[in-house]
């Protein structure tokens, strides 16, 4: 006999825990299965844009911010630098282990059961249930199952998610002494990189700096060299990293499925992230909330409708921006130095306009078409 639940969530990251919170809050008996134990380290820049903060507010989770960013510095391969901001908060910086643990606690308070160190090896189905098959061979049944176990997880394979954009992200967590903390406090560096579509970053988080780079998969050695060069250029090469990690980010193709029968995928498992900046936390939280509500209501079509109204247009706009940026990063860098360019990027940070609205404007639409 299998355990039976209304909603089973696979994965306890932002997408899974947002889904569990939404489902449990709607009255569904909800179980979360997580292979690790919180708090656990996750490779992630940890920058929260406005949409992430709004979603956390909906979930009743105060962001465990290690810094609040009001200043952005931009460089193009380390040159032609300029600074913008010093007016209003643009981003909040968190450590993923702290954010995810806060989300776990909130999901449990909402009524979800979170079962940790419980690995899911496969997904099965019959007429009335979807089943998570566990490492010990037992099964857990849910009237609906929400997959949030990452882009390489078993739920993405079950649903048949396919991705047209795969990127390699590399990241260092550098413990820094107080003088460096003060130097970077409130300031983020974005460096447009030497590889097509690549960029690097420095994100301050109190006593640590998260330094990373991302580029298209297939440029592994060049991406590693870019990270080494960035760290050296910033005078951080002598600091022993507390974490040295990498991961692949996968962005769904336009026709990739999001639902298969009673199984819905959200966040990274669905390939949902912003294609140009590769921002994923807000996409995870928002898609998780939509999936949780749809699963609790027994209405998978509601999930796809919600995504079509919110996240999918942003992703399509981001793909157009990435195509233009990959060919002409210098033009993008110069545009950000202008008042309209900075307003558009600040709007992205605040999530009060979105790339879809920016790209829809005639001047931007024509410029992107020419650059692409």
Image (cartoon, grey):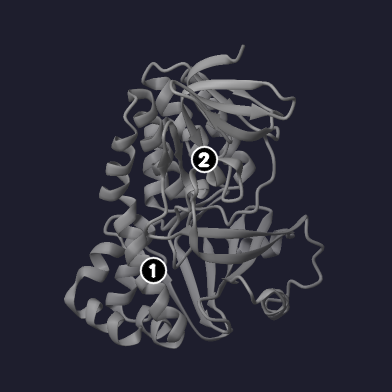
Residue highlighted by disc 1: 319
Q: Tell me, yes or no, if residue 372 can be seen here.
A: yes
Dot 1 surroundings within 10 Å: few (below 14), some, or many (20 or more)? some
Q: Secondary structure at mark 2?
A: helix
At 74% from the left and 71% from the top, the residue drawn is 236
- Image quarter of residue 321: bottom left
Give the Cα distance between marks 2 and 1: 23 Å
Q: Earlier in the sequence, mark 2 or mark 1?
A: 2
Residue 246 placement (x, y as % from top left) = 69, 60
At 49% from the left and 60% from the top, the residue drawn is 163
- Image quarter of residue 60: top left
Q: Nearer the viewer, mark 2 or mark 1?
A: 1
Image disc number at residue 14: 2
Residue 66 placement (x, y as % from top left) = 58, 48
Q: Is residue 202 left or right of residue 352?
A: right
Residue 263 placement (x, y as % from top left) = 46, 34
Camera-nearest residue between 200 and 137:
137
Camera-nearest residue between 336 and 122:
122
Residue 278 placement (x, y as % from top left) = 49, 62
Q: Tell me, yes or no, if residue 113 can be seen here.
A: no
At 81% from the left and 71% from the top, the residue drawn is 238
User: Compared with residue 292, is residue 155 higher up or lower down, i.e. above or below?
Assistant: below
* Quarter placement of the C terminus: bottom left
Camera-nearest residue between 342 and 263:
263
* Quarter placement of the N terminus: top right
| Residue at the outermost top position | 1
User: Compared with residue 122, is residue 354 higher up or lower down, i.e. above or below?
Assistant: below
Q: Secondary structure at mark 1?
A: helix
Q: Is residue 329 left or right of residue 3?
A: left
User: Compared with residue 114, is residue 206 higher up or lower down, i.e. above or below?
Assistant: below
């Amino acid at each position: 006999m299998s355990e039976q639940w209304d909603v089973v969530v696979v994965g306890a990251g932002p997408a899974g825990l947002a889904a569990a919170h939404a489902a449990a809050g709607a009255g569904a008996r909800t179980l979360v299965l997580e292979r690790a134990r919180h708090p656990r380290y996750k490779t992630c820049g940890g920058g929260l844009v406005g949409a992430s903060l709004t979603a956390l507010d909906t979930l009743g989770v105060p962001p465990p911010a290690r810094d609040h960013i009001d200043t952005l510095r931009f460089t193009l391969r380390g040159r032609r630098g300029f600074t913008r901001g010093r007016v209003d908060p643009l981003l909040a910086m968190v450590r993923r282990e702290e954010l995810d643990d806060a989300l776990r606690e909130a999901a449990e308070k909402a009524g979800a059961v979170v079962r940790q160190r419980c690995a899911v090896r496969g997904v099965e189905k019959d007429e009335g249930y979807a089943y998570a098959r566990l490492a010990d061979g037992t099964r857990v049944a849910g009237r609906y199952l929400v997959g949030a176990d990452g882009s390489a997880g078993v739920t993405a394979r079950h649903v048949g998610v396919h991705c047209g954009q795969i990127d390699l992200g590399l990241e260092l967590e550098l413990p820094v002494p107080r003088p460096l903390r003060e130097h970077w406090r409130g300031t983020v560096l974005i460096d447009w990189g030497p590889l097509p579509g690549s960029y690097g970053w420095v994100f301050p988080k109190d006593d640590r700096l998260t330094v990373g780079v991302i580029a298209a998969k297939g440029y592994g050695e060049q991406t590693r060299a870019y990270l080494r060069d960035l760290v050296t250029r910033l005078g951080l090469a002598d600091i022993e990293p507390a974490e040295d990690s990498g991961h692949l980010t996968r962005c769904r193709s336009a026709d990739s499925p999001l639902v298969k029968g009673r199984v819905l995928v959200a966040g990274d498992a669905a390939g949902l992230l912003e294609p140009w900046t590769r921002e994923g936390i807000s996409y995870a939280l928002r898609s998780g909330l939509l999936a949780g509500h749809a699963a609790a209501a027994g209405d998978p079509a509601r999930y796809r409708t919600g995504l079509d109204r919110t996240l999918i247009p942003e992703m399509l706009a981001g793909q157009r921006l990435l195509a233009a940026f990959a060919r002409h990063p210098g033009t993008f860098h110069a545009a950000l130095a202008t008042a309209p360019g900075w307003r558009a990027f600040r709007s992205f940070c605040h999530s009060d306009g979105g790339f879809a609205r920016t790209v829809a404007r005639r001047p931007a639409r024509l410029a992107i078409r020419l650059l692409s």
